[in-house]
Every structure is written in C-alpha cells, then in structure tokens.
Image: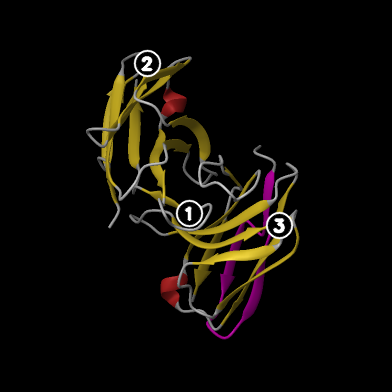
Amino acid sequence: GQNIDQPTEMTATEGAIVQINCTYQTSGFNGLFWYQQHAGEAPTFLSYNVLDGLEEKGRFSSFLSRSKGYSYLLLKELQMKDSASYLCAVPNYGGSQGNLIFGKGTKLSVKP
Amino acid sequence: ETGVTQTPRHLVMGMTNKKSLKCEQHLGHNAMYWYKQSAKKPLELMFVYNFKEQTENNSVPSRFSPECPNSSHLFLHLHTLQPEDSALYLCASSQDGRGSTDTQYFGPGTRLTVL
C-alpha cells in the first residue's frame, strides 16, 4: 500500500523559519510534490523533487531523501500570508497516469 | 489565478436534485482531473481524462457522472447525492496525463452542500 504522513497543524512566528515534514511509503517512487492551499482557494504548485537533496526557490526550499522516504518543506522569513495548508503528494507508482496520492496536509498558522 | 476556472463556486442541493459542476482550463493542457476534498481527509482523485478519454475512475459511485467534451472543458454531473457527498470538488489540469509527474494546476473548487 501507499501512505503519506504529515503533521496536522503547526504554528510559527512571523519572520521565523519553519520546517514541515512529510514521510511516505510507496511501492515505487516517481518524485514528490508540495502544494500550498489557502483556505477556500485552489492548491498551488510549490515544488517537485525527484532527486535527493535540497532545492531552493526563494523563501521556500524542499528537501528529499529517497532512502528514508522523507521530505520537508522549509519556509524562511515567514510572513502572515504563508498561513495556509501545505500538501505533500506522490504519484501513485504503477497506477494510472495522473494519479497523485495526497497527504492530509499541514495547516500552518503564522502569528505576529 | 491558475488558468483553471470552476463554476459555480458554491452549490447547495437536495438529495433529489440534479446539478452539474463545470471546469474550464485556459492553459492548453490535455489532461483534466476531478478531486474531492473533505474536511480532515486527503484530496481524493475521482476521475482523469486524457485527450478527452477517461483514463481513471477511482471507484466513484455512479451518482457522479463526468463528461469531457473537449480538452478544455470538464463537467461533473450530480444526481441523487447523499449528505456525505458534501465537500469541496476541485478540478485540475496538466500538460498531458501520460506521466504521473506532470504538474497539476487546480481550480478554486466548488463548495457543495447536500441537504
């Protein structure tokens, strides 16, 4: 079977750094996505990792360790607008095209 | 604005009603998807269309009926729904569905309440 785990909620302070973890168990591996979803809005693409290591994109970075089945999203210099849910997703390896398996999402609250 | 629009944004319907959700993408993509998002549950894939052909039906009850007349439009026809079908229904599109690593772009969703 395939499974994705993320913390349900996290709280951090404006200006700080926060790390959102995601662990996955899949029968194969074809990369990992991170999406951001503000309340009542569409999920928006943040990153896609298929190789081990850290990929930086401005204030957001995403890390992957395939051997550990582990990824994290690192948010620096937090802003109030970063309050959102962060969704981790992996393609359903061996499943039909386009089938992404999502975690339940981590709701991040940024406090002043 | 992701280039994927959905209407209506909110819908309240009785269990005996028939309604349709509409999705349109302006990205020139060839694959379109319907997802269901319930409170405290992961996004669940419902249907996938690739080049107008349905390529995935994720064990969805027949009271949900998708239609894809062309690569830019996707509908979800609803009839005799149950209260537990109340959820946010999200549409997404990607360049093509041949590879599961395509980035998917989501619409804002339709918030459905079944009374």
The magenta-colored residue range is: B4-23
Disc 2 is placed on an element classified as loop
Badge 2 and badge 1 both on one subunit: yes
Tell us which disc is closer to us: 2 or 1: 1
Q: Is residue B111 left or right of residue A102?
A: right
x, y percent for residue A56: 43, 16
In this rendered view, identify the residue nearer to me: B58 or B89. B58
From the viewer's perspective, is A98 left or right of A66? right
Tag shown at residue A99? 1
Q: Residue at x 70, y 46 (%)?
A: B29
Residue at image location 61% in from the left, 82% down from the top = B17
Vertical order, A89 against B38 (above or below): above
What chain does mark 2 sit on?
A: A
Is label 1 on the same chain as label 3? no
Residue B3 location in percent, x, y?
Answer: 69, 41
Residue under numbered circle 2: A76
Q: Is residue B91 above or below residue B86?
A: above
* Amino acid at circle 2: Lys
C-alpha gap between disc 1 and disc 3: 16 Å
Residue B107 drawn in magenta: no
Q: Secondary structure at mark 1?
A: loop
Badge count: 3
Discs 2, 3 touching: Cβ within 8 Å: no
Q: Which residue is mark 3?
A: B51
Q: Earlier in the sequence, mark 2 or mark 1?
A: 2
Q: Which mark is residue B91?
A: none
Three-letter code for the amino acid on which mark 1 is drawn: Asn
Instruction: Locate residue A74, reporting x and y percent.
Output: 34, 22
Q: Main secondary structure of the magenta part?
A: strand
Categorize mark 2 by other alpha carbons within 10 Å: few (<14), some (14-19), many (20+). some
Q: Amino acid at mark 3?
A: Phe
